[in-house]
Image (tube, rainbow, N blue to C red):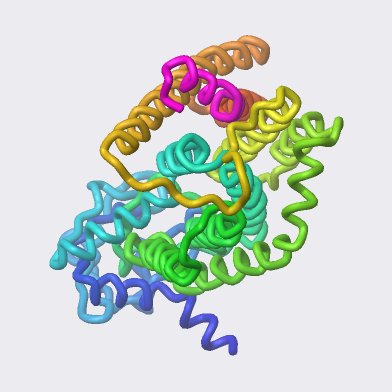
């Protein structure tokens, strides 16, 4: 079993998948601190994202200041100079060759389904154009699954695939740990939560929805291998953990809906609990984007939860009327244009909210802490990052759930 787990977590499996899909590395140039990094046993000493050392064993030779290494029939070159203990640094952008444009486009689009841009557009679009109930369900499950996944990464501290031999197409989250893949977790949770919840609200063919949920989840998971950001084990565990969480929580979704909408304590718990979880997020010995991303997700969840509670109190939930599940209206050009208009107006309001509140909250928090808002290191401190990101995305959740539909009424878009 241990051999199987090692194989599934290995970088060579990821590199092999990339090559099978037509993604190949070109000459990669690395910079090491001293020529002493070339050992007599043919190992190159490098440094992981968490600062720990590991050895890449190759058939390596030092010649003219360059370490030439060969691994599985692919050649890599490591440039050596005299920097003082700088570890391993890329001296030029990663280079790669794409020999299958279809897979390249397919997997990059699939990878985008787990990004902030997708969340801030798809989830609200469900609220504006289909059913606020479904958006509320999706946000609740998404927040729980993502929080657990992000915490597991920083507790387990398992590294991402090594480059080389893997080609890495993303850089922003490379300092994060790999296990589990939160892209795979989010895609599985959103796809199957939508499938299970929509059957209560909308008439559709369940088998078609099931196939779509499986295909979307699989594409997002495979995209993490293609982009070189996760091992096969990371992705498999992401699928399994997310499926387990959805399955275990499914019987309690209706009870939670009732408490979320009708309990007098709901808005307080919806804000205090996520904020507490953000401040008690596991500490690392280096900066990672996981805490900030988790704060964003929990902030959105808090704002939406309070907003839906307010709508319930005001008696205007904007949910479909009549017996459920309702039949989907026929797709007409007028209906399509109205839907596009709602999306553009709604997204514009969210972007404006994000830019305004982010600008103001960052400056207020930095002023209170005696820091400059232009200082990148200051913005990464917990007592600055958490409050300004949480307030920004809580505001986005409130605007999405309370204000946007009322603007649609004024503009006669509903």
- Quadrant of residue 361 within the rendered picture: top right
Q: Is residue 103 above or below residue 293?
A: below
Residue nearer the viewer, 378 or 291 = 291
Residue nearer the viewer, 153 or 147 = 147
Whether residue 137 is visible here, answered yes or no, is: yes
Residue visible at 66% across and 15% down?
369
Q: Position of residue 230 (x, y in %)?
A: 44, 64
Q: Position of residue 150 (x, y in %)?
A: 60, 52
Whether residue 286 is visible here, answered yes or no, is: no
Q: Is residue 394 above or below residue 152?
A: above
Residue visible at 54% across and 17% down?
357
Residue visible at 41% across and 61% down?
220
Residue nearer the viewer, 133 or 378 = 133
Stretch in magenta: 397-414
Q: Position of residue 253 (x, y in %)?
A: 72, 54
Residue visible at 60% across and 39% down?
321
């Amino acid at each position: 079993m241990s051999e199987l787990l090692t194989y599934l977590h290995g970088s060579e499996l990821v590199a092999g998948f990339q090559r099978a899909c037509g993604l190949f590395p070109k000459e990669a140039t690395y910079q090491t601190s001293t020529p002493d990094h070339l050992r007599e046993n043919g190992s190159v000493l490098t440094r992981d994202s968490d600062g720990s050392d590991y050895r890449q064993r190759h058939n390596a030779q030092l010649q003219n200041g360059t370490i030439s290494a060969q691994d599985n029939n692919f050649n890599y070159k490591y440039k050596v100079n005299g920097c003082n203990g700088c570890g391993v640094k890329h001296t030029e952008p990663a280079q790669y060759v794409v020999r299958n444009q279809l897979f390249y486009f397919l997997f990059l689009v699939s990878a985008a389904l787990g990004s902030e841009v997708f969340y801030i557009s798809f989830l609200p679009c469900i609220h504006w154009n289909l059913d606020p109930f479904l958006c509320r369900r999706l946000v609740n499950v998404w927040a729980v699954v993502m929080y657990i996944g992000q915490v597991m990464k920083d507790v387990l501290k398992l590294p991402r695939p090594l480059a080389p031999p893997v080609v890495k197409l993303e850089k922003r989250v490379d300092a994060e740990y790999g296990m589990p893949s939160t892209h795979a977790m989010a895609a599985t949770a959103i796809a199957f939560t939508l499938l299970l919840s929509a059957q209560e609200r909308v008439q559709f063919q369940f088998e078609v929805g099931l196939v779509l949920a499986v295909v979307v989840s699989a594409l997002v998971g495979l995209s993490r291998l293609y982009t070189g950001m996760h091992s096969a084990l990371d992705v498999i565990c992401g699928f399994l953990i997310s499926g387990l969480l959805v399955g275990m929580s499914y019987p309690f979704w209706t009870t939670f809906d009732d408490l979320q909408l009708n309990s007098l304590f709901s808005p307080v718990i919806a804000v205090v609990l996520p904020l507490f979880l953000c401040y008690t997020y596991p500490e690392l010995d280096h900066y990672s984007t996981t805490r900030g991303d988790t704060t964003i997700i929990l902030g959105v969840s808090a704002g939406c939860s309070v907003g839906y509670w307010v709508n319930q109190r005001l008696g205007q939930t904007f949910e479909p009327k009549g017996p459920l599940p309702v039949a989907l209206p026929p797709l007409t050009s007028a209906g399509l244009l109205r839907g596009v208009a709602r999306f553009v107006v709604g997204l514009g309001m969210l972007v404006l909210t994000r830019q305004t509140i982010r600008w103001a909250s960052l400056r207020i928090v930095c002023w209170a802490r005696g820091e400059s808002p232009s200082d990148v290191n200051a913005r990464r401190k917990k007592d600055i990052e958490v409050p300004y990101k949480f307030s920004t995305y809580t505001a986005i959740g409130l605007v999405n759930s309370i204000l946007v539909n009322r603007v649609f009424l004024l503009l006669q878009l509903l």
